[in-house]
Amino acid sequence: MVALTNQDGGILRKETFATIVSSCKETFDLCCGCLMQFLHEMQAGVEDLLGVGINVPGMYDSENEILIKAPFASWEKIGVKQYFQKKLQYENIFVENDVKNCALGEKYFGHGSKYKSYVWITVSTGIGGAIVQNGQIIHGSHNLAGEIGHIKVEYANPRKCSCGEYGCLEAYASGTAITRAVRHRTRQSPAFRRAFEEWGLSADAEGCADLAKRGIRDARSIYEQMGDYLARGIAAVINLLNPQVVILGGGVAKSMDLVLPIVSGRIGDYVVEGLAGTPIIPTALGYEAALLGTTALVLDKCKGV
Ligand SMILES: [Zn+2]
């Protein structure tokens, strides 16, 4: 997704296209072409921008400006900033992990006006997190703080996670994990498989959420299990950090009315007594969280406000 925004988070131009997973350079070139087109339409040039903010998925080493690894695409050791600087002939390029940017976007344009200490969790294809303490993102010693998706939530016969470890939250509560659970259960239950067909839904996490809301028992139980694991992961974070609030975003935002009551109902089983009332709320930015996060990143770096 490429957009031109103003400094209040207003979107002036926006374009969405599929990532070319096989080639990060082709994807980057598409982004650059799109940005140049927007500027052309606005009769402006890169020199008129305050900066260009970029989201990268996966582990980003902000000290050395290297994308260490984006597991979904097998992109490794890429100098994202340098590439865009050269391609756009422009200096003010800022790059950060997408979930850290979501948390930053929230600070500038969402719930951040109300809360100074929060944990931002994205539940999407994978699960990621970012920690904000007193209005500042916690980076950790290698910019890897907040890997909530790899908190262990199961030790008995744990499932393998995409990171190579076992029992991680991501292996139980991500969109990918739900889709896997759906496929497994439709193989065992012809009635469950037929329910997807009857309602014209695809047998994945989103279709399953739809069926759960319609009261289909198998779908409901998949989400109850997912919500229980999510509560275990969130509880670990609440016990450790005592945030004012936990903010959820990502693809799960579409099914928040289903997931939130389940998680809120279970959280008390896993946190220490005094923290059971920690609110868990949806992002104020919906699908634009990461996008507005890049605007926030530019503001943060250029203005330091
Ligand atoms: Zn993992």
Image (tube, grey):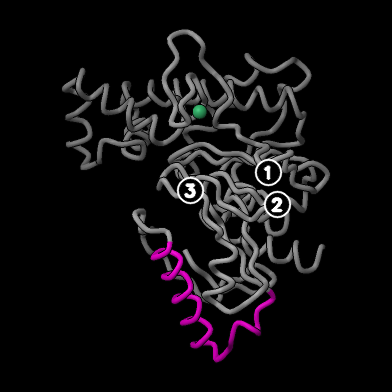
Is there a contact, CB below 8 Å, between mark 3 and mark 1? no
Under circle 2, the secondary element is: loop
Report the residue marked by disc 2.
Answer: 63
The amino acid at mark 1 is: Asn
Comparing 134 with 162, the one in front is 162
What residue is shown with label 3? 76
Residue 143 is labelled as: 1
Q: Earlier in the sequence, mark 1 or mark 2?
A: 2
The secondary structure that dominates the magenta segment is helix
| Magenta span includes 294 | no
User: Which residue in the rendered view is the most extreme toward the bottom?
Assistant: 43
Label 3 Cα crowd, 10 Å radius (few <14 / some 14-19 / many 20+):
some
Taking the view exactly as shown, the residue that stands out farthest to the top is 156
The image shows residue 78, relative to residue 210, as above or below, that is below
Question: What residue range appears in magenta?
Answer: 25-50
Q: Is residue 265 visible?
A: no
Q: Position of residue 12 (x, y in %)?
A: 55, 76
Q: Is residue 46 magenta?
A: yes
* Dot 1 alpha-carbon crowd within 10 angstroms: few under 14, some 14 to 19, many 20 or more: some
- The picture quadrant where one finds residue 131 is top right
Q: CA distance from mark 3 to mark 2?
A: 16 Å
Q: Earlier in the sequence, mark 3 or mark 2?
A: 2
